[in-house]
Image (cartoon, helix red, strand yellow):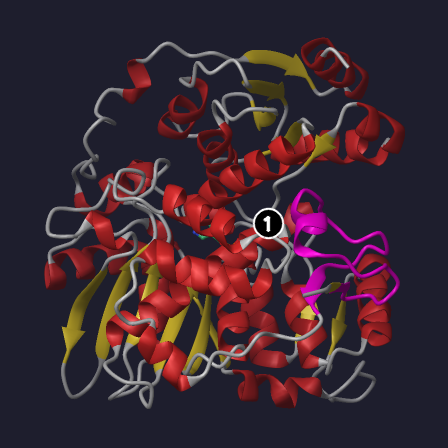
Amino acid sequence: MQYASTRGHAPQQTFSQILLGGLASDGGLFLPTTYPQVSGEELNAWRGLSYADLAFEILKKFATDIPEADLREITRKTYTADVYKNARAGEDAAQITPLRTLENNAERHLVLQALSNGPTLAFKDMAMQLLGNLFEYALAKEQAELNIFGATSGDTGSAAEYAMRGKRGIRVFMLSPHQKMSAFQTAQMFSLQDPNILNIAVQGVFDDCQDLVKAVSNDLEFKQQQKIGTVNSINWARVVAQVVYYFRGYLSATTDNTQKVSFTVPSGNFGNICAGHIARMMGLPIDQLVVATNENDVLDEFFRTGIYRVRASAETWHTTSPSMDISKASNFERFIFDLLDRDAERVRKLFAQVESRGGFDLSGGEGSDGDEFGKVAAFGFVSGKSVHADRINTIRQVQANYGITVDTHTADGIKVALEHAKPGVPMIVLETALPAKFNETIREALGRDAERPAGFENIEALPQRFVVMPADVQAMKDYIRQHTGL
Ligand SMILES: *Cc1c(COP(=O)(O)O)cnc(C)c1O
């Protein structure tokens, strides 16, 4: 299988070639030249598979240049009950992403799929754990090394660190804004004592961290010499790893392949729901893909109006579902590519316009850039938005009605899911984090602390390992050089 850029001006690559990279050389994102198809018989045959073996069946369609025996070993090593052990009481950890029916009656069939039972209690572990094992495998083959350099406001950085800790040939340099993350998130990252994990607390805000990563990455010579790589949300292997749980959710909520389900996805960078779109393009019988946003409603605006308008930093709100606080959805271009019938020239123009004029308009109205908004429904997409008051209200309602505490992002999902649920079609809401990660808002909603999985009770008291640095590019480069010895 070959991968091509959404902007059409980069050479095609294989899965292994794009594994360690980010953007294509023309600034686009990689997608397979065609989506592999899954037949109804194949789907039914997958019903009895373990999560690891289902992941193998799906991944082998995309990673055609990795020997199947190796791939099976990697998926079996990744998706184990021991890694995804933070399941709630009553959930079976061995299912990796257990489903829980919240309500099933004439009006609606509402289901929660737990994606956050991994080491950092957020769904990013689902893909990052696989990435860690794939990286280690690829680097060992070439006897190469890789220095991952990234910025985080919380979930991504910790997922990357827990996936890469102790891995041969890999070092992680992770920037975070000094004293701006929650105590829990800080403790999760900084308590890691592995020598290959380097936490850098930057004197500044998240944007400063991101600017530093950009500045260092734009120095191509430094990047090459220091073997710098990224694990950000556009990484193709991350997206494809996420395709698997849509299949798992479908198979667990249905009994035969004539049935459909819908998914609601708490969304930020459009990485998670992009995987749902790909699952649907592969033939998975998905009725609706519901995009749920918070106050930062770039995506909701597009799916209601056809207008994509990225926000400036001053217009990006800091909310109580912080992992969805984005001004610009980095994976969105993959969907637009399909929406425009894979017309790379038009994608190139539209995303150049995002840079120059802050967006584009596909509403078909006067002066718009196209009328493809009319085709959005044919791809199953709808959307909705949830704000702080909705979040608090939903956390309370879900606790009262179903006896379970959900986190703030999942609450946004449930709020929007209820607006779109149809009788007879299971509506699966993806649970993207456990509530312990966002305890302050749980206290506000319920007047008590969120339960913590075993082993996390005293995490804030553990010794922490990190350095504080100014937001200075040269100082950052010196620090990296010192630690890589390259
Ligand atoms: C990252 C994240 C999201 C947003 O996912 P995207 O793939 O960026 O759309 C939602 N909820 C939680 C808890 C997250 O960590």
Mark 1 Cα shell of 10 Å, populated few (<14), some (14-19), many (≥20): many
Closer-to-camera residue (198/144): 144
> Is 315 placed left or right of 459 in the picture?
right
Residue 49, image quadrant: bottom left
Quadrant where the image shows the C terminus: top right
Location of residue 298 by image quarter: bottom right
Q: Main secondary structure of the magenta part?
A: loop
Residue 327 image position (x, y, % from top left): 63, 53
Number of residue marks: 1
Q: Position of residue 192 (x, y in %)?
A: 42, 19
Residue 386 in sight: no
**Which residue: 62% across, 21% down?**
202
Would you place residue 424 above or below residue 72 in this image?
below
Q: Where residue 453 sits in the image (x, y, percent)?
A: 21, 35
Residue annotated with mark 1: 233
- Quick one: SS at disc 1? loop
Give how far across and how far down residue 450 sits, in percent. 21, 39
Q: Residue at x 33, y 90 (%)?
A: 258
Residue 218 is left or right of residue 88, and the answer is right
Segment tinted magenta in the rendering: 4-32
Residue at 81%, 80% (x, y): give it: 369
Q: 6 and 468: which one is in front?
A: 6
Determine whether the beta carbon of the residue marked 1 sits less than 8 angstroms from the nearest atom of ligand 1: yes
Q: Is residue 443 visible?
A: yes
Q: Amino acid at mark 1?
A: Ser
Q: Which residue does the image show at 49% across and 29% down from the upper left?
A: 161
Q: Quadrant of the N terminus?
A: bottom right
Q: Is residue 26 magenta?
A: yes
Residue 285 in magenta?
no
